[in-house]
Amino acid sequence: MSSDNELPVSEQRLGALLQQLEVALAALESAPSFSRPGRAGRVFDLARRILLEPGGCAALEQRAQAIEQAGTFADSDWAEPQRLQPALTPASLGSPQAETVVIEALSELRLLAVARGDYVHPLLSAEQAHNHLTQVLALNLSRIFAFSGEAERETQGRLAEVPRALLRYLAERIGYEFIVDTMIDEIWRLLGQRPLMVAPVRRMIDQMALCQANPEIDLGTSGQGAARLVSSLYGPTQGSREDPGIEAYAGRLAGMDTAALQQEATGMARAMHDTGLVSPYHPVLLRYLLDHGDHLLSEALGLSTTGRDCLLCYHQLIRALIDAVAHPATAQGLYGLALLLERGILYQPPLAPALWRQLGLLLSESSRQRLRLAYGDAATPEARLLEGVLCMLGLPLGVGQGNNPTCQSARALSMWAYNDPDYLLQMVTWAARDDEIVMHFEGQPISSNASGVGLSHGMALDLDPVSLLVVPHLDRIYAEMGRLCIGREGDPHRWVNPEFHGWWAGRGFHICVDIATGGIEDPETFYRHFYAAYHPLYNGNQPLVHPQPAGIAVTDSAARFIGWHAITILRAAIGPDEGMRVYFFNPNNDSGQDWGDGVQVSTDGNGERFGEASLPFAQFASRLYIFHLDPQEEGAPAHVSADELGEVMGYLRRSWGADRLAPA
Amino acid sequence: MEKNPDKGYIALLGWSLGAVEAAAAFDRRYVVVAPEWAEEYCLQHEIPYLPWNFERLNDRSMEIAETLRDMGVDAAVPLFEETVEWAGAINSVLMQNPRLHGQAVLFRDKALMKRRAQLGGIRVGIFEEAHEKSDVVRFFKRVNQTLLKLDGDPDDPIHLKAFDKAGCLGHRVIRTYEEIDAIPESEYPLLMESHLDGWEFAVEAWVWDGKIQFLNISEYVTLGYSVFVPATPELEQYREQITRQIELLIKTFDIQFGQIHPEYFVTSDGTMYFGEVAYRPPGFKAFELIERAYGFNAYQASMLVFDPKATADEVAAFFPEPVKDAKGHAGCFGVYPRRRVVSRLEIPEETEQHPYFDYHELSAPLEATVTKRTAFGTHWGLMFFFGDDPHTLRDLLKHQESLDFYV
């Protein structure tokens, strides 16, 4: 002990704890499976004490690889870091359970080591890790800056020091300025895709607003771009500039003349269309304008001539919709309404009556409970669902699957909102009112209540209101359709996709993967058919008529295979760079992904509409493994050039085809 | 670990994760005999397993002994008080020695145990069996009359214990007549003992070939709260006398092999009083403490001394020399919440940062309201400490009693 005496007490303690950790990790690594929980518990407890010591985070970061390889994360949600959701970290870091806090902390330090390039992880690239950490920091800014609430102290006590120490350390290693600026970029990138679920983005903006308002936080020169985001929510117009509060704003409106109201209306609309986010002041204004003629309503919704025509044509319905949805808690519905009007879909005869039905819809008790559970009591379940319906009809490509394995159901909802909106409204009615959906598979009715389990287990709450109510039914029906195909030769999607999505999904079907072996079979012929059916230079310049379901093999940034995924092909067209691109919808919550080997899915800047993702045609084809087509419209596969095929084959060979192609 | 077919095949009676871990890492074949609820877990983790319900004694009871014999099992090791008699019965079949069962019954019945000890010339306190409330009242009165108490003097307490339960389970201390009224009918019959004002300690001894192979003295800091090994020099000074006492015990109970866990009091004049003896691992994780202090696994030690195929050389090589070979002193403290309403676990900073603090097995509270303790109750988990100086450790353990771990 004598040689340690020169060291400060805390360093002595840290040294001793790290030695104990080494022993505990070795014990965990060599443990038979039944002893693992106890030994992992020992590791977590030591890690917790180390995190509380000065220099503890750094010491654990250095040992990240050893910690993971000892099996610390095995059999837990943290075992697959590529699937971790930053949005869940505020809950896990705020948990009163020490083990939850510590395993999350260890996982973040592991990601830090990966992001810094010190730890080459088999499942996750440095960029992925870096993105993840930036989002984690953004979502937990308040903890970094220590304006912690009483509540946190009360539930966590001294344990609250662990996440704080962790986040400060992460922020130091990554750089504060960088966080705020990256966070702003990240927010704009996400908003560019116009997701239906804006709550996480709103939370990040709230965090920035809190930081800006706190004089103790010096953000340096960073965060300049934050103002536009914060003001679009909390002060988009002259009358609301200093975030006066809903009551005060309503009072001000009463004193404004028409010119001032016009200015308010334009300001609100501009902020809304700029960001896709609706300020809580916006519904106050719209409700007030209900008594001031259609012109100001149209201005406040920021409508073009198409939208304005729709508004005038159906003004009674639109007023009823505004009256039902214009509340600060469901403000987002106004953006959905504006885009719904712009799409002109109200001119489809069934839609207006279907929306009237929606307005008077009586929800079942279980539907109400579900909506309350997911969104709380700030708005009635009816208003919440209406907000969701309007948003989905306005932004069909904003649907996301949340953290659930239900990409087919999300894709179907999006496709109906896009292509068959009154059918979507019918589905919503059945699900919300009757708690049952019946679909038919080759003439045989399938009830969502009679079907067994779906793909998703447990109740998912991280969904938009429509998905929240409809997806559980669709998921079970989809799974049942799959079961009815058991025993048929080949891939069940061939029969399920057209029956599940709609008549327009082509009955012709191509797949390049042998289901039994997982090997890729005759890819050239597969690509020839795809080009002949979808590529305008080979199909007689025929634009795609209906959105088509398709299956892709998703790869990570190192071009390694991750899994099969359902998407919708929307169109193929020449992009701004004169190259042919495929524009598609990915029900994954964030389409902007790096699929490796230079295949970078773009969501913005290459001619995409809101919510679309796009890739150059050949790159897209290389990740495709299933597509549908009309058997009468096969095109001329023989005309596809060898150069084109060669390019696709190259992308395939360098990615998921590497170990699936038969040796040449 | 690679199993050696030339060595004994051991059945562990009762479910104990620590014992299974030890067996998995030992060179002997083993099988866990446990109730059916353990089956799924054992299957999942490939633990050799045989289902048996120890609570049901009937005419099928011979079946388990025969099954184990047919499997080629050589010895059964009891892990809990409830399996001691089973082990005796099974071993009497496996080793063809009918007396082993009778011996086990002595360990299970505290009244019989004390009588046998008394017959063997071992000094015990005053004890009696109680079948109803009036027996307790009479005993309490008589004990205090013997002590020449005057009216108004506080009465000396008496101890009540269930006949066949382990350690502190069912242990009550009676200080007033009102407390006698509070004893539920269901606890009768029970054993009553006079209170001995002395220093209470426990021994863990491994016996093989009728001789002590290793003798550990566990020092209680506060009964039911804290214990550590090896003991302070003040208690270790009695090691010679304690060894004599244990040898007397071995002779009286005719113990050839096994692991015993007796409790004694030593009074200020150095007289030893026998409390009770158990033929199984002690509660309070004393096995873990011994392993932490000496480095050998105490479950493996028990498997070894039960194994009829163990050799003298192997036994001699297995055990270290007491006290001298200890790497330090290991102790543990049982945490009871001190507040009536608790919301979370929070280990006091001074405890957590003490260089002797090793690890803990406390879990977060499941309920906010703490039920009032009856009898000695059960602790909510253990804190483990390890350090060089037994006095520092003892004072540290004592000090924990004044701290809140659940707030």
Image: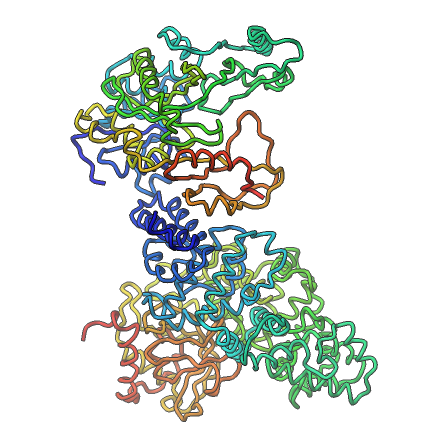
Residue A51 visible: yes
What is the quadrant of residue A84 in the picture? bottom left
* Quadrant the C terminus of chain A occupies: bottom left
Q: Residue at x 56, y 42 (%)?
A: B406
The image quarter in which residue B16 lies? top left
Near-viewer residue (B90 or A571):
B90
Q: Is residue A552 placed above or below A403 in the rendered structure?
A: below
Report the residue at 50% width, 10% height from top.
B129
Residue furthest to the right: A255
Q: Position of residue A509 (x, y in %)?
A: 37, 74
Question: Does B207 sit above or below residue A381?
Answer: above
Does A34 sit left or right of B138 as displayed?
left
Judge whether B34 appears above or below A200 on screen. Answer: above
Q: In the depicted view, which residue is nearer to us: A276 or A426?
A: A276
Q: Name the spot of residue A381 as percent of width and height, x first.
A: 67, 62
Residue A452 in view in this figure: no
> Horizontal placement of A570 versus A284: left or right?
left
